[in-house]
Structures are given as structure tokens and as C-alpha cells.
Amino acid sequence: MSIILIIIIFGVIVFFHEFGHFIFAKLNHIAVNEFAIGMGPAIFSFKKKETKYSLRLFPLGGYCMMEGEDSASDSEYSFSNKPVWVRMIVVVAGPIFNFILAFVFAVILIHFTGCDPATLYYVQPGSGAYEAGIKEGDTIIAINGEKIYNYRELLLYMQLNDASEPIEFTMKTPEGKEYVTVVTPKLNENGEYKLGVQGGYVDTKNFGTDLKYGALELRYWMKATVTSLKLIVTGGVSGDDVMGPIGVGGAFDDVIDEVKEVSGNKKEEVINIILNMLNWCILLSVNLGVMNLLPIPALDGGRLLFLIIEAIRRKKIPEEKEALVNFIGFVLLIILMVVVMFNDIKNVFF
């Protein structure tokens, strides 16, 4: 069951990404030769006007193949013959649509599960937070000068930083008074450094709150994704922490098992699985959007970088040089995907 659900999740995310490229190509009168969901041999296809629409065998991937995207074309409907600003819009539309999808799903998820403002509902007596003057009902505005909006941002900070170090908090009382205090975490009985505070989810009051925290949910996952990428580059995480589609499938399988254990009946189980699917869609859609904006050849960010260089120098980069760089980038991405896949297989099955 989890395999089918993961295929659906990846299919939805890839569809919206490629649909972003597709719709803005059409709006700017760029011919789209093929719009495909999946990779490999086509199992279903049809053609309407100049565009072939296809569903391909392997569900992890897809593409929007535009006229003149990777080769020279004299057509007035060619991607390469459009103004540079038009090409930039078409390129970034894919990642932007991923963020839009994540926002819509976040609003739906928050409507049913609530939001997690950075308001503390419990402060443990004798803890570092208690001794620093923090009280129940106070809201965290910033950690070490960096603004936060979700309670999970505090958890993310504690997870990714030295938990024993003192932390400067900017707080706001329920009456609206702001103050700054420094909290020194204390060791608990398990030998872990803890602040001694708790926050969590609360019901949203109205649709406006859903929209607000939907945007903050998007912000949180973008922040978490960028932070994770920094840790990968700096060696802050090991190879075993990097997860591909197979790893995601294994993790989602564990989530389904947990849902079955805590659900009281079949209806509740189905609802909880759907809500967890939405959460995974948000996470993966944001990850795809951020990853594709990285200035790496063969990704949208790499193509955008070439277009920015073209706009600055007011002259196109020779197509053969751009094609060579993109080909090298594509090969490296394939190698990376193979490495991640074997890592997934090792972690999931062994």
C-alpha cells in the first residue's frame, strides 16, 4: 500500500512542477513538444495540437520538453528565441509551482490538525527557562536574534546545534511586553540537555489563521531544507541520513504502521493516512522546489544561472558549451541518484 501512496505523492509533486513550466511556456507562446509524467517507455500517450502528452513507465520523474530548449530552432515559438526574461519566468515556474502546491496542502493540513505557534504552554519549575524568567503563555519571538514563528523551529535549533550552550531568547508576554533573556539548558535524568519548556499544536480559529500558518509552514520547511543542505555540504550529516525515493517509501511505511496502531477505527485510519500524505507532499514538494533552484547544471537553477549570465553580458552563451555543461551535470546527478538508491536499499532492507 505504501508503494502505491508514494507513487501517487511523487506523481502529484512532479506533475505540478512540470505543469508550472508547461503553463508558462504556453502563456508565452512557446511550443511544448512533449509533456511527460514518469520516465522510460511510454505506456499511454496522445497528441493535441503540437504537444504530445504521455504517461511513462517509471513514475519517479517527468519533463516538459519545449521547442528549442536544448538545441537550435528557427521557430518563432522556440524557447531559445524568446526574450531572456521570458525564459527566466518559464524556468523558475516549476519550483514556484512546487511552493504553491506545498502552501495549498499546508493550509488544508493546518485546518484539520492545527498550527504550532511559538507560544509555551508549560515551563518546568527549576529548569533553565524557569530560572531565566520565562513563564507559561510567553511567546518566543527570536532565538539568538533570528526570528521564529513556529515552535518546531525551537526543536530544529536544539537538534542542529550544541544543546548545552546558553541561548538568547527574545520573548513576548501575553500582555504584549517584550523582553530578552538567556537560557542555559540543564542535563536531565537521561543525560540530555533540555530547556524545560513545551509548546505544541493548537486549533486554528478561522480561515485567515489557516492561510497565515500555511505560509509559515511553507517557510519552516524551506528553512529546514536549506539548513539540511548546508549540513550535507559541511559534513554535518552522514551519508546514511540522506534519503531517496526508496528511503522515503520505507519511512512512509513506518508512518502507516504507526497510524494503524493509534487509529480507533477504519475511518480514522484513512483520515490519518491522508493527513500524513499531505505532510509528506509538503515536505517533498518544498525539497524539490529548493533543490531545483540550486545553481547546478541540468537543474532549473543551473539553467537560470546561464540566463542571468546572458542577461548581464547581453549575449547568449554558445549552445554547445551550455549543452556540454548540462550533460556533465546530468551525468553527475545520475551517479548521485544511483548512490542514494543503493544507500536507501542498504538502510531499508539490511
Image: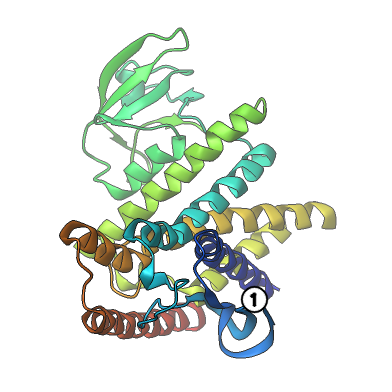
Which residue shows up at 33% across the image and 82% down it? Answer: 330
Residue 70 against residue 174 in the figure, above or below: below
In the image, 135 versus 208, the foreground residue is: 208
Would residue 181 be visible to someone looking at this image?
yes
Q: Which residue is mark 1?
A: 3
On screen, residue 49 versus residue 184, left or right, reads right
Q: Residue at x 43, y 25 (%)?
A: 124
Q: Residue at x 30, y 84 (%)?
A: 327
Q: Left or right? Give the position of 131 relative to 39.
A: left
- Of the 4 image quadrants, the one containing the N terminus is bottom right
Q: Residue 330 vs residue 265: left or right?
A: left
What is the three-letter code of the residue carrying label 1? Ile
Horizontal and vertical percent position of residue 285: 51, 59
Location of residue 150 with respect to 90 vertically, above or below:
above
Q: Can residue 201 be seen?
A: no
Residue closer to the observer: 153 or 308 = 308
> What is the x, y in percent for residue 214?
55, 39
Most distant residue in the left direction:
313
Residue 110 lies in what quarter of the image? top right
Q: How many numbered marks does the figure carry?
A: 1
Is residue 86 positioned above or below 55 on the image?
above
Give the residue drawn at x 20%, y 66%: 315
